[in-house]
Image (tube, helix red, strand yellow):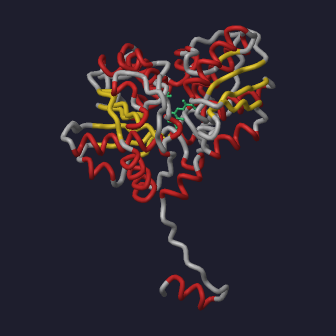
Amino acid sequence: MSEPQRRGVLERWAEVLPITPQTPRITLGEGDTPLVRSVAIERELGVDELWFKLESSNPTGSFKDRGMVVAVAKAMERGAQAVLCASTGNTSASAAAYAARCGLEASILVPHGRVAAGKLAQAVAFGARIVEIEGSFDHALTLARSVAGTHPIALVNSVNPDRIEGQKTASYEICETLGDAPDALAIPVGNAGNITAYWKGFVECAERDYASLHPRMLGFQAAGAAPIVRGEPVDDPQTVATAIRIGNPASWKPAEQARDESEGLIEAVSDDEILEAYRLLAGSEGLFVEPASAASVAGLRKLNREGGLRGGRVVAVLTGSGLKDPETAEHANTPKVVRATATFEGVERALGL
Ligand code: AN7
């Protein structure tokens, strides 16, 4: 039997999305990402089940596509011809892709020198207009909001509720695949839109009887960019996980609500812990993710060490692909490379055979 065709988020989840017959059914094949069982880290953590939601399998390599397809479709429905976002990289790659697909102009505001190379390469390839600002992501978002408030250009950051609606579909998929909600969901937190979206999705799943329970939401920020954990904005956020280098998250309040209503937590993990999890995911699970995504697993390992991880069934969201950030891949790993003469014997010697 052949696989059912990927229908995309708008068509597959139409009944739970704010779309109308006039909403264009655009898609790049986003959503329906794999949920893969852990083979190694599950044992280390001692939980009953650990699953990874591979959001890197989305068309531009991150979870952003779920929300972007809805945001761009709704913008088109309202007559928009141009979209704008501020971004640490993945939002801009996604916005640029859907804009290219739909014949819209995309403009992106990025913090100069702080966006991983793969993400910038995507924005360039998709033909976006790139504005590099001397400042942080938080500055860029403030500027994007005011420009979109003054000019006829649709803002597609996660302050746009259509983004949250699209991203909540990941929770529906998890409940569908597992037959229920998990006991806990581990997720990296940057601008805090995604934890907000997942929680909305899980609440709706319980209301619709797709799930019998709510997961505890376990959010993790990078220690150098942990405003929610510290309880105050961070002026100059620092972390190797550039995707979540954010000092004043737009969805701060709803993220706290998700944490509190789910009886979960939002904690910080250090760059060393993030890179350890990054290497472990690749080396022992075969999952090459970007540093920000490894924060969810770093957080679970930290909770386990501190005795704060209850058992049960846990899902970790792996938000983006390792290919996005080749520089970190090079610096954080030690390659097993040997030189060999181009002969049979040379290769034998090199392999120690
Ligand atoms: C891989 O692209 O904010 O807490 O501008 O790219 O919803 O912000 C990216 C965020 C986690 C955090 N993992 O999600 C952007 C941007 C990856 C990310 C997050 C991001 P939010």
Q: Which quadrant of the view contains residue 67?
A: top right
- Which quadrant, please, contains the N terminus? top right
The residue depicted at 41 percent of the width and 16 percent of the height is: 254
Q: Is residue 113 left or right of residue 180?
A: right
Residue reaching furthest bottom? 345
Image location (x, y in percent) of residue 69 = 64, 25
Q: Is residue 189 left or right of residue 62?
A: left
The residue depicted at 43 percent of the width and 59 percent of the height is: 283
The residue depicted at 36 percent of the width and 35 percent of the height is: 186
Q: Is residue 35 above or below residue 74?
A: below
The residue depicted at 58 percent of the width and 15 percent of the height is: 160
Q: Is residue 258 above or below residue 111?
A: above
Q: Nearer the viewer, residue 352 or 242?
A: 242
Q: Is residue 254 above or below residue 49?
A: above
Q: Is residue 192 left or right of residue 347?
A: left
Image location (x, y in percent) of residue 103 = 81, 25
